[in-house]
Image (cartoon, rainbow, N blue to C red):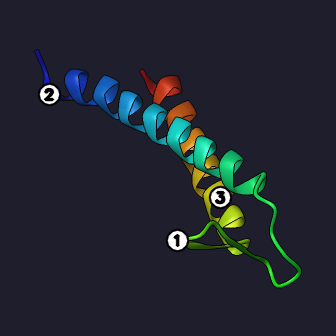
Amino acid sequence: MKLKNVLKPLALVISSVAFALFTLLWWQRFNMPYNDAGRYFDGLVVFHEQGVVVYALLSCFCFVTMFAIAYRI
């Protein structure tokens, strides 16, 4: 069995899990009630609204990667 045949499904699983996690993080951060300054304080941590864009981009990147790997298998 070639190493390539093992690594492709593994890469597909990793990119799928990363896509799911980044999408979940994006959804949670997107629904937070930010103030006018773009911050949300939950009592312990300050979340910034700019993180929403970063998680959306990471989610899109993982989706494209997942699709490309699935297409090549």
* Mark pair 2, 1: CA separation: 46 Å
Asked which secondary structure carries label 3, the reply is helix
Q: Nearer the viewer, mark 3 or mark 1?
A: 1
Q: Residue at x 14, y 28 (%)?
A: 3
> Quadrant of residue 19 in the image?
top right
Instruction: Say which residue label 1 marks.
Output: 44
Q: Which mark is residue 3?
A: 2
* Mark pair 2, 3: CA separation: 30 Å
In the rendered structure, the answer to whether residue 8 lies left or right of residue 62 reads left
Sequence-wise first label, 2 or 3: 2
With respect to residue 58, does 44 lie above or below?
below
| Three-letter code for the amino acid on which mark 3 is drawn | Leu
Instruction: Say which residue label 3 marks.
Output: 57
Crowding near pointer 1: few (<14 within 10 Å), some, many (20+)?
few
With respect to residue 26, does 52 lie above or below?
below
> Where residue 35 sits: x, y (%)?
84, 75
* Mark pair 3, 1: CA separation: 26 Å
| Three-letter code for the amino acid on which mark 2 is drawn | Leu
With respect to residue 64, does 49 lie above or below?
below
Q: Residue at x 23, y 21 (%)?
A: 5
